[in-house]
Image: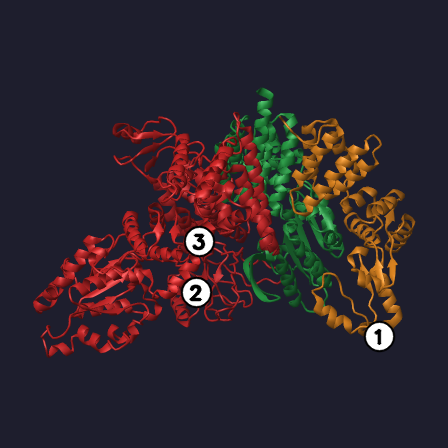
Amino acid sequence: MLWVDKYRPKTLDQVLVHQDIAQNLKKLVTEEDCPHLLFYGPSGSGKKTLIMALLRQIFGSSAEKVKVENKTWKVDAGSRTIDLELTTLSSTNHVELSPSDAGFQDRYIVQEIIKEMAKNRPIDTKGRKGVLVNLVSGNAYLAYDAIFLVLNEVDKLSREAQHSLRRTMEKYSAYCRLILCCNSSSKVSEAIRSRCLNVRINAPTEEQIVKVLEFIGKKEGLQIPSGFTARIAEKSNRSLRRAILSFETCRVQQYPFTSNQAIPPMDWEEYIFEIASDIMKEQSPKRLYQVRQKLYELLVNCIPPEIILKRLLYELLKKLDAELKHEVCRWAAYYEHRMRLGQKAIFHIEAFVAKFMSIYKSFLIATFG
Amino acid sequence: MDLVNMSLASRLEREEAEDLIKRHGGRVIGSVSKKTNYLLCDEDIGGRKSEKAKELGTLFLSEDGLFDLIRVSSHAKPKQRSKKSVDDADVSQSKKIMHKTEIKSTIQLTNSASKNVANKSLASGANLDRKMIQTAQHSALTWTEKYRPRVPNDIIGNQSLVKQLHDWLERWHEQFLDTGNKKKGKTANDSGAKKAVLLSGTPGIGKTTSAKLVSQMLGFQTIEVNASDSRGKADAKIEKGIRGSNANSIKELVSNEALSANLDWTKHPKTVLIMDEVDGMSAGDRGGIAGLISSIKISKIPIICICNDRYSQKLKSLVNYCLLLSFRKPTKQQKAKRLMQVATAEGLQVNEIALEELAERVNGDMRMALNQLQYMSLSMSVIKYDDVRQRLLTSAKDEDISPFTAVDKLFGFNVGKLRMDERIDLSMSDPDLVPLLIQENYVNYRPSTVSKDDNGIKRMSSIACAAESIGDGDIFNVQIRKYRQWQLSQNSALSSCIIPNVFCFSDLGIEGERNFNRFGGWLGKNSTLGKNMRFLEDLHVHFLASRESNSGRGTLRIEYLTLLLKRLTEPLRVLPKDEAVREVVDFMNTYSINQDDFDTIVELSKFKGCPDPLGGIPSAVKAALTRAYKEGSKSRMVRAADFVSLPGIKKAPKRRIAAILEPSDGGLGENNDEVTAESEEENPSDAEDLEDSTVGEKLQKELQSLNKKGVQVHLDLKDSGKLSAKKPPIGRGKGGSGATDKKNTARGSGISAKRKR
Amino acid sequence: MLFYGPPGTGKTTTALAIAHQLFGPELYKSRVLELNASDDRGINVVRTKIKGFAAVAVGSGQRQGIIEPLASRCAKFRFKPLSEEIMSSRITYICNQEGLNLDAEALSTISSISQGDLRRAITYLQSAARLFGSSISSKDLISVSGVIPQEVVDALFAACKSGNFDLANKEVNNVIAEGYPVSQMFSQLFDIIVEADDLSDEQKARICRKLGEADKCLVDGADEYLQLLDVAGSTMRALCNMPEEFSYN
C-alpha cells in the first residue's frame, strides 16, 4: 500500500495536522446537531481525510464500508428525459459523489439525488437523533436519521447547479446533511456558503509536513539523512499528499538515501519543464508548432489544462527577468480565464505561448539587439 | 501561341498567370516541346525545362515580357481572339497590383480598344433575342442527342475498348451457343470468355453509347434495362422485373425456355441485354446483383452491364462473371475537338482555348460539356474564355466545397479579391472543420502582410494575434452551442477563420517539407483524450472500490500516477523475477488494479521523447507477471466495482454494484458481507446487450459451470440482501449493464464504466 | 407590496409575520403561498398557483430585479441594512438566551463582518459557538466567517508596494495555501485601496478597475492563483508608477 494511504488518519483523534480543527469538529458532532458543512482549502491539505474521519466519528466504522456504484438516473428535463450516470461511494449512512463529473447536467444530479434520499427517509422522523451504543466497541454516539451527502468539487459546479443545490438544501435539510468539499470557496455561491458552516483547511506548514514525514520514516524504519525531509517538504509546495508521495518515490528510487539525493518531480512536471526550456530557447512559428504537439501530449494524457498553464507559468517565471514577470502573469491570467470560457483548451494555451514568444522575442531584441 | 510556366513569378501567382495567358488566347502546357513558343520564368533558374528550352531554341519570357506580349497581341488581333475591353481591363487590373504608373497607359489602350468591339452586354442582349426565336424554331433536341455518335469512330477516346467490346460481342454466339454444352463448364473459368461484359467509368464518357452502337453495328437488337426499372430479386428473376412489352421475349431469350424447341437462331433476331447503371441497384432491388449473376449463368444472350464505379462493394461478386472494360475519360483535346465540331455545326463562335477550358472543367463528362455549351449558346453566339470560366464557377459554387478547398482558397493568393461575404461563405461551408483546419495550419504560413521582418518579431506578433483570434472563435463557439446564441455564427467565422487568415495568409504557401494543409489535429486528439479519460475513470473507480484511497480522478492522475507507475515497474526491473512478480501482483491486488488499469497507467505516462515507462523490463518478466496475475484471479479477493447485468428488462436503469469484501465487524445496519472472489480481465464485452432470455439461460449455465470450478462469488445487491452469481472477467471497453431485478441470477462482470460526458 | 433591500434585513420574516398576523395559524396555510427564487417554476406556475391567491407579498434583493410594470403596481417598502446598535443589541439578547459569552471586541467584530446582514451575524455566532464553545473571541468569529485576517491583507499590500515581484508572488502563494477565498481578498484589498491616504486617485482607479475585472474572471471560473497574482502585479505597477501597457519597440 502507498504510504499516503497507509498512514492516513482514520479517526479525528489520530489526525496529526489540524488537530485543533479535528477537536472542534468532534465537539461539533457529538454535542450538537451537525449543520451543513463546507470544507475548503488547497489541494492536499487534508479535507477529505477530515471528512472521512468526521463520518467515522458520527457513524463508527460502518462509514468505512463503502460500496462503489455507478448509478443512473432518468431525469425529466422539460421536453426530454436525460440519462445521467455517475459513480457514487456509499455506505449505510452517507453517499459521496462528484456532481461536476456530469458536465452540463450537474444540476440534475444535485436535484435528483437529494430528492431520492429524501424519499427513502421516513417522513416523520425529520432527522431526529438519538444516542446509540455500539455493543461491540462500546462507543456511544449519535445516530442521525439523516443521510449525509458528501459532495466533492463543488467549486466546479455550474451556476445553475449551485442554485438548485441551494434550494434543495433548504427543502430537504431535515433529511440530509450536506458536507461540501472544494478547493476555492470563491467559486461557491454566496447563498450556499451562508447556509453552511465554513471550515477552512489550510495547507500545513513545512514544519508540520516534516513532522509527518519523520513519523512515517520512523514507522517504516528508515534511515533519513538530516535535512532530507526538509527538502522534500520544501518541494512539496505545502501539499502534504505531495510530500508523502515524493518521499515514497525517493524510497523506491534509491535506498539508502543520500543526503543530496534528487527528489524527482512528477512526470508531467518534467515534461512541462522541457517545454519551458524549448520556449525560452527559440521563439519561432516552427517552435510553436512543436510546442503545440507537446502540449497535446500532456492534454491527451489527462493533465488538466489549467494545471499545464500554471506550471508552465511557474517554470517560465523562474527564468525571466523581473520586468517581464508582470506582463507574462497578466497574459497567463488572461488566457486561463478565456480557457474557462471556451472549450478547446489547446487553442488558448497555444495563444499564451505565442504571446509569450512574441513578448520575449521583442524583449530579447530590444535588450540585446 | 504556346507558353510553358516554370517558376513562380514574384508578382504573378501561377494560376493568375495561366488565367491571363488563356484569356488572351495563349495555351499553357506543362513541358517544353518543339511547338512551344515561349518559356515563362523569372530568371535563368536552370532545371530541366530551361535546359530543354535552350536546346530547342524556345524564347524565354519574363513577366514584363508577358505583359508586353499581351498588350501587343491585344492590339494585333481584335477579331477572333477574345481580346476586348474586358481583357484589357484585366491586364490593367493585374498591373495595378504592382505599378500604379502604368495604369494610365493601359486605360488609354482600353478606351481605344473598346471602340472596336461591340459592348459585350449589348451583344449578348441582342443575341438573346435572336436565339430565343431560333430555339423556338429548332426542334427540341438536346445537343447530346443530336450529336450522339453514330459510328464507333465518333466516340471520343477509348477506341481500343470499343474494339474489344465489338470483338467480344461478335464472338459471343460462337463461343457460348454454338459449341454446345461441353464448353459451358470451362467457359465460366476461362478468363477471356465471359458471358457478360462490364463497362465502367465516370458519367458521360460514352459507355451506353458504345454499347448501343456496337450492338447495332453487329446487327443486335438491344434491350435496355436501367435503374428506373425495378430489378429486385423479390421479382424472382430479372426478366420478371422488366416492364413493358419486352418482358416475354426477354424471358424467353434469357432462360431459353422457348428456344428449347427451336434452335434456329437465324429466325430470332440477335438480342443483347444492356443492364445500365448496375451499381445503382438500390435497396428496392435487393438481391438484384445475385439475380443478375444467376441470369448471366444461364443466359443465352450477351449481357452488357454498365456501371460507374467498378470497385463498388455491390459489384464485388459481379466482376467475376464479366469481362471488364474500364472506360477512361477522354483528354481535353479530344473533347475540345468534338466540341468545336458541334459548335461549328451550330453556328457558334467559340474560342479554342475556351473549349479546352470547358473540356477540362467538366471532369471528363462529355455530356455535361455539351449541355453547358448548349446552355451558353442560348444567350450568346460568341463564347469566350471568361464566359466559360464564369459559367463553371457559378455552377461550382452550388457544389459542396470541401473544407480543404475552402482553406486553400482562404489562404491562397486570390483572397484579397474575395469579398467579405464570400470569405464568410467559405468559412461557413463547414463550420466545424474549416476552423480546425485553419488552426492546424495557420502557424506554418509565411505571412505576406509582414514585409520587413528580419528578426521575426512581426511575424511572431502576427501569429500571436491570430492565435488569440482563434481563441475568440472558440469562446464564440461555446456561446453558440451551449447557450444557443446562433446569431454569433458570423462572428465565430470571422474570428476563427478570417481574422487569422488576415494575419497569416501567404503568397508563398506553406513552409516546410510538407507543404500542404494538414488535417485538423484537434479532432483526433480530442477523441483520444476522451478515451483516456474513460480508462482513467475505470482506474479511479477501482481505486475507490479498494477503499484504500479516496482521491478524486484528477488527483489520481496528477499526484499518484507517477508513484504508481514506479511501484508497478521498479520491482520488475530490479528484483529477481519471482519476487518482483509477487510484489507487483500484491500491489495490484491492494488497489484493485487489473491488467487493463496497468496498461492505462503505462499509457498515460508516455510522453514523446521520454523513456518508455516499461523500458528495461525483460519480456520474460512481463510474461511472468501476466501469468501470475491471471492465476491469482481464481482466488482473488479483489475489491472492485462490478456490473450486475440482470437479463430481462431492457430499459431498466443500469446498476453496477460493488462487491464488498470486508468481513463484517459489527456495527449498525450492515449488509451481510462476505468474502467475494472476483477478477476482472479479458472477457467478451457483450454484457451490455443482454436482453434476451436466451442470454439469461446462458448466464445460468455459466454460473453453474463456474460454481463447479469452485469459485465462490457473492455479490451484494443493493435492495436484496442475497448473494449468488459469478461473473467472468471483462476487458476494457463497454461495461456490463444490468436491470434491477429481484432475481438473483446476477452476473457480475468487470468494470470499464463507460462514462457519458 | 414590494419589499426590497439587502439580504438578512428581515424582508421574508416581516412578510411571514404579516401573513401570520392577518390570517392566524388556521387560515395561514390556505391563504398564504410562499414561492422562492429557486423553486422550479416558470410562467405556468406563476399563472396557475399565484392566480389563486389574493394577497401576495413580493420580496426582492434589488430594486432593479423587478420589472417596471410589476414595481409600479406595488407599494414599495425599503429595508435598509441594519445599524451596528440594532445588531449588537439583538446579538446580545441571543447570547444571553443561549448562554454565550461575547466580549466587546467580538461584538463589534460581528457587526462589521456581517455588514448589516443580521442573518449572517447570527449564523456566524452560531457557528462560532459550535466550533469554539460558549466563550467566543473576535479571532474565532473571523475564522468562522471566512474574513481574512488583516495582517495577511496588509502583508500582500506591502509586498506590492515594495515593487518586488517575487515577494508578491510569495505572499500570493501564502494566501492560496492558507485557503482564503480570493474574492474575499479582493474585497478587503479594495477597502484598503479606497481608504489609503498615500495613493493618488489615478492609482486607485487603476487598481480598482483591475480588481473589478479580476472579480468577474473569478465568477467565470478562472483560477484563483493566477487572478490574484495578476492583481498583485497590476497593483505593483500602479503603486510604483510603471506604465500600464507593456511595449518593447
Residue at label 1? Answer: C26
Q: Which mark is residue B689?
A: 2
Residue at label 3? Answer: B124
Label the red chain with its letter: B
| The C terminus of chain B: image quadrant | bottom right
Q: Which amino acid does label 3 sit on?
A: Ser
Report how far apart the C-alphas of labels 2 and 1 lie in the structure.
Answer: 57 Å
Which image quarter: residue A230? top right
Q: Residue A356 carries which label?
A: none
Q: Which amino acid does label 2 sit on?
A: Asp
Image spot of residue B697 (x, y percent): 39, 70
- The chain letter under disc 1 is C
Q: What element carries label 3?
A: helix
Marks 3 & 1 on one chain: no
- Tell me the colour chain C is drawn in: orange
Furthest residue toward top: A368
Label the green chain with its letter: A
Report how far apart the C-alphas of labels 2 and 3 lie in the structure.
Answer: 68 Å
The answer to whether residue B262 is above or below residue C115 is below
